[in-house]
Image (cartoon, grey):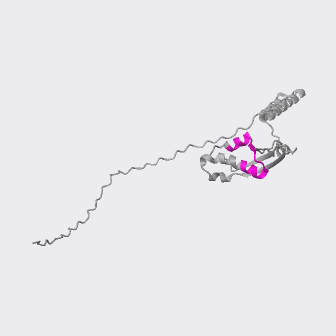
Amino acid sequence: MSQELERVYIIPLGKVLISQSQHRAVRAINMIKEFARHHMKVEIIKIDEELAHQIWARGVRSPPRKVKVRMSKTDEGYVLVSPFIDDVESALIPQKETKKVEDNVEIAKEEAPAKEEAPAKEEAPAKEEAPAKKVVKKAEVKPAKKVVKKAEVKPAKKVVKKAEVKPAKKVVKKAEVKPAKKVVKKVKDLK
């Protein structure tokens, strides 16, 4: 077997919840090993450390419901189970180009000197230079966000009068006592 056999599976771990809460992560590891034995037809299974960390990340009581793994059969005769990381799709999807705030500031600084140099070359009167400066200021200053503070409203405290609790009286029902029947034994004279 010169080639490595590699497969990707999604292993359902929902039945882990059947076991006691303090044994769930251990059972999840055992379920992964059992799944690998069944599907890869090999007895020796090794679980990658990253996959073990992924299962134990939320603690022993709440492992994930399902795990996407990559199982690769090696030349040594064991199966290595590791978490699936999709490198191909991330390379195909182009990342969005986002302009940083610093880039916008640099562009504004580059435009500002260009606007100031144009009136200086023409030697225009002072009245025309003033509006040009105002335009530069408008480009540099960003409008402030309006922050509206909500008045803190404290809920009214409910005044509850506590009723005076009196100890309960023990009510003992007197049983009607019926007079016992008099049993008269007749004594026979034994003579």
Q: How many marks?
A: 0
Task: Please tell me whether residue 47 belongs to the stretch shown in magenta.
Answer: yes
- Please identify the quadrant where the C terminus is shown: bottom left
Viewer-closest of 71 and 89:
71
The percent position of residue 75, horizontal first and vertical second, equals 83, 42
Q: Residue at x 74, y 41 (%)?
A: 48
The percent position of residue 184, horizontal first and vertical second, equals 16, 71
Vertical comparison of 172 with 48: above or below:
below
Asked whether residue 18 appears in the rendered view, the answer is yes
Picture quadrant where residue 178 is located: bottom left
Viewer-closest of 177 and 154:
177
Vertical comparison of 64 with 100: above or below:
below
Viewer-closest of 74 and 187:
187
Give the overall secondary structure of the magenta segment.
helix
Asked whether residue 135 appears in the rendered view, the answer is no
The percent position of residue 189, horizontal first and vertical second, equals 11, 72
Task: Please tell me whether residue 120 belongs to the stretch shown in magenta.
Answer: no
Q: Which residues are magenta?
A: 33-55
Q: Residue at x 56, y 43 (%)?
A: 152
Q: Is residue 15 left or right of residue 163?
A: right
The percent position of residue 73, horizontal first and vertical second, equals 81, 45
Query: Which residue of the protein is positioned furthest toward the left in this rendering?
Result: 191
Q: Is residue 18 left or right of residue 44?
A: left
Picture quadrant where residue 46 is located: top right
- Please identify the quadrant where the N terminus is shown: top right
